[in-house]
Amino acid sequence: MSARLHSPQTRFALRPLAAAMLAALGWLAVAAPALAQDAPKTDAAQAETQAAKDAKDGKEIKKDADQTLDRVEISGTRASLQRSLNLKRNAAAVQDSISATELGRFPDDNVADSLSHITGVSISRTAGGEGQKVSVRGLGPEYTLTTFNGRILATDGEGRDFAFDVLPSDIINGADVVKSAQASVMEGAIGGLVNLRSASPFDQPGQHGLLRVEGDRNTMSKLNGGKISGTYSNTFGKELGVLVGVVYADRKVRTDTAGNDGGWTRNPISDPAANWTGNAWGGNIDPNGNGVLDPDEEGLIGPGQFRVGSIMEQKKRLALSGKVEWRPSDSVKVVVDGIKTRLDSPQVGYQQSFYTLFAPGRWSDIKVQNGVVTGFTMNSADPEQQLNPELLNLTTHRVVDSALYGANVEWKATETLSFNGDLYQSSSKRHSGGQDTYTVLRMNQPNVTSVQLTGSQVPNISTTFADGRDLISGLANGLFGPKDFNTHYLGLSGDNIDDKIRGITLNGAWTVDRFHVDTLRFGVSTTRRDKNRDLVDNAINGGENYYSGTNAINVGTLGGNVLDQHLSLPNFMSGVSGSFPRSFLGFDVPNYLAALQAYNGKPRPDGGTYDFSQAGPVWNPLQSYRVREKTTSAFVQADLSGDQWNADVGVRLVRTKTTAKAWDAKIASLTENGPFNYTAVYADPTEIVQDASYTYGLPSANFVWHFNDKLQLRLGAAKTMARPSVEQLAPTSTTASVAWGDFTQVYGGNADLKPYSAKQYDASLEWYYARNSALTFAVFQKNIKNQITTSWETGVDIGVPGHLFNVMKPINGDTARVRGMEIGFQHLWDNGFGVRAQYTRNNSKSVVAGVEGPLAGIAPATSSLGLLYEKGPWSLSATADHTDEFVSAINVIGPGFHERAKAITWLTAQASYEVNEWLKISIEGRNLTDAKQEYTLGNGAITLPNGYNRWGRAFMLGASLKF
């Protein structure tokens, strides 16, 4: 583990946040008054303000002594924090919550961003910097279960981990992160259960509505976006209530990116104990050119491929939500609700790629420092050995349709017996088959190139062509055009995923009130999940190389206005030093594909004529699967209490049956088209079907001791489980990597993989020392068994003549352990100021085949600091969320060579002004420190740059109208 993880700044990450927080509040104090002028208050308005203040202070408001108490609705950040603290204090288990600031208005634009303020929660970000995946208590998204009103949410990915960017925050009223276990709570999480809640129309009796309009702008990309949302609720007496909501958002974002997509090349090491056989496709890196792996060349590292560019994304969201609540009597409540969303979020990446992979005779003037090739020249007379810079278009077609519909009935059968029944269906659909692209155009002019590693995310690169043109200045000045490029790699891929979950639950509660037993809870449930994936690509039919090698077409001859963009983006890679092209050409795939189809019938050098249908995507049985998972569970739980304590103890019994179908296809023949360029011909696919089942008993116990009305201690112990990711249950395998010369067979999984299981222990001391204020401290430990990891076997004969393969398989590893501590603090002063802070520290390790290492994707420390001021019409707040450096991938180029994500702090701030009781205007800043996500690769002695994402600052101006 690097020294960075043990620095004082990292051990307590709240310290460096304070200055940024104060600066953000100072900015808000200056910016907010410009939004509106203070309106003079009437006596009625002053009285209303005082009533709201009293309500915020917990006071009761009466019309007169003889009348029923009026309800004064509380809104705003302070009220949200109050509700969240009350939920935590009164919860039966260890829990933290986030609540809406008002009807239809969540604290952040993204639910994942709001969850990152919670102790023990960290998030990953997608293009544009938006939060997407959630990790709890040092365990990744695959250990987390996400539900909506207690119902499992279907996902558009291959696994179970939920992508929060498909769900607009406007349809969420609250979110609970449940960290300890109860028998009565759905199983399937080791890290934590994230339950999203929708509002009830009876939360605010009467007629209420909110219409909100927002516009946003990113300062890095100079792109604009907007959102409009509306929420309406009404109650008709005490019997009937309705709530509906609609959201439409259209946001444009840009992500500058750099990385080593082709990986770093590392020579093998002869010592078997080193357990590294090398990954150099073109031959071992040989600085002295003697054709022998000398002792000082063992383990030598050099760049394989690096690229730099920008990802453009237009994110459109549409969401509809509704709820009808019927209470025909005091003993019956019926709720029918649903949500339907569409995320239309295509990404187009315009990038330049430099394929520098070593091959004999390709490098000269090689410089080596500390076991790393830091510089070389590429000046071979062989056109295939020259650099040949490339243009990439990487398109991700992501259109996700999600829905969840359900009905819930509560029935109080007698004074002591009640039942709750729930029926729901959740679905998610994303059909991207054949619409994702990895397309490459390749420069075809003789050149001399030098590459120098500087430690920056992009090396210095200098390319001079035979006609005297320089790559950097020539791109900046428009000196290159279509004739300088040939067609090369045409990767057309994508998958069609359909996920459907159906569940039914029947729970009961019997009030006992004897022998310290308050309530006996019991229930049964059944869930069926069907997840289908169909891969559609042109790898299985060799179409990706149809226009490459000797069959490449000059883009100038191709015509069709393929190279139609000269990209000089504002602030492009401004945070990265070095000399490399910062202007580049771009092409859109639809124009390119149309031009290729128009070229049909022209003579093809290898005989025959060009026919685009030979290169088009087809159904690929490899990595396609059908998985059906049926789960039946039953539980019994006793809720107990005494004079100063309360507790629950119970057990949940879970039975799961899995049926998985996939296909296999052997390589019938393999053709070498050139260096690192192969075409495989596959035999007809054969069907593989696997059945498996398992049964788990999951006991749990929770205990709360109330020292007094302010101080309480929670203790919890349980056995928990998390099921394997869905794609890991399918017996798929693929050898698609042979297309670029990597002879590896990758098995996706098998139905016999066991779930993760854990024995977990929790202790939490909570001091609610003042109204709406608390200081909490918690410790936890999770001992995990059956951890799923990857095995790697080299030199395997899989039946392809002349080639041995590496084989990768998911396996149940030995053990893993996660332990940590959490500190939470919240204080709200009567003068309008408030502060909240959290710090979480994790210590984790895994043991696979007797070898101890870190758990990938786990931040050793996360923290959050929030400051707020809310009084009268003004509301100001700023929040900084910090994630410490963590290991993001293990053993990337050999044992101990881990990829690390550097520490990142995400700062947001907002100010709002309530012009009157109907109108509020607001301004919000996101990523105010212009945080970047950077990755490195190393073993402690060697550190290499391995990735970079920058999203820029964004500002949002909004107005909301209440009635």
Image (cartoon, rainbow, N blue to C red):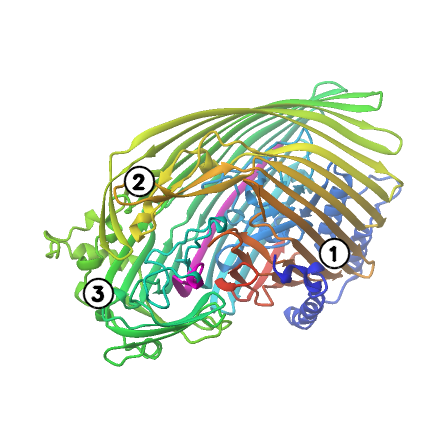
Tell me the crowding category of disc 1: few under 14, some 14 to 19, or many 20 or more residues within 10 angstroms, Cα based. Answer: many
Mark 2 sits on what residue?
620
Does 290 appear in magenta? no
Using the numbered discs, state the Cα–Cα distance from disc 2 to disc 1 in whole angstroms.
52 Å
Q: For the magenta stretch, what is the residue range?
A: 296-325
For the point 60% across and 28% down, the residue is 408
Using the numbered discs, state the Cα–Cα distance from disc 3 to disc 1 in whole angstroms.
58 Å
Q: Which mark is residue 836?
A: 1
- Name the magenta segment's main secondary structure: strand
Tell me the crowding category of disc 3: few under 14, some 14 to 19, or many 20 or more residues within 10 angstroms, Cα based. Answer: many
Q: Amino acid at mark 2?
A: Asn
Question: Which image quarter: residue 644?
Answer: top right
Horizontal and vertical percent position of residue 14? 71, 61
Position of residue 604 relative to residue 90, above or below, is below
- Give the mark nearer the N terminus: 2 vs 1: 2
What quarter of the picture does the N terminus occupy?
bottom right
Mark 3 sits on what residue?
555
| Front: mark 2 or 1 | 2
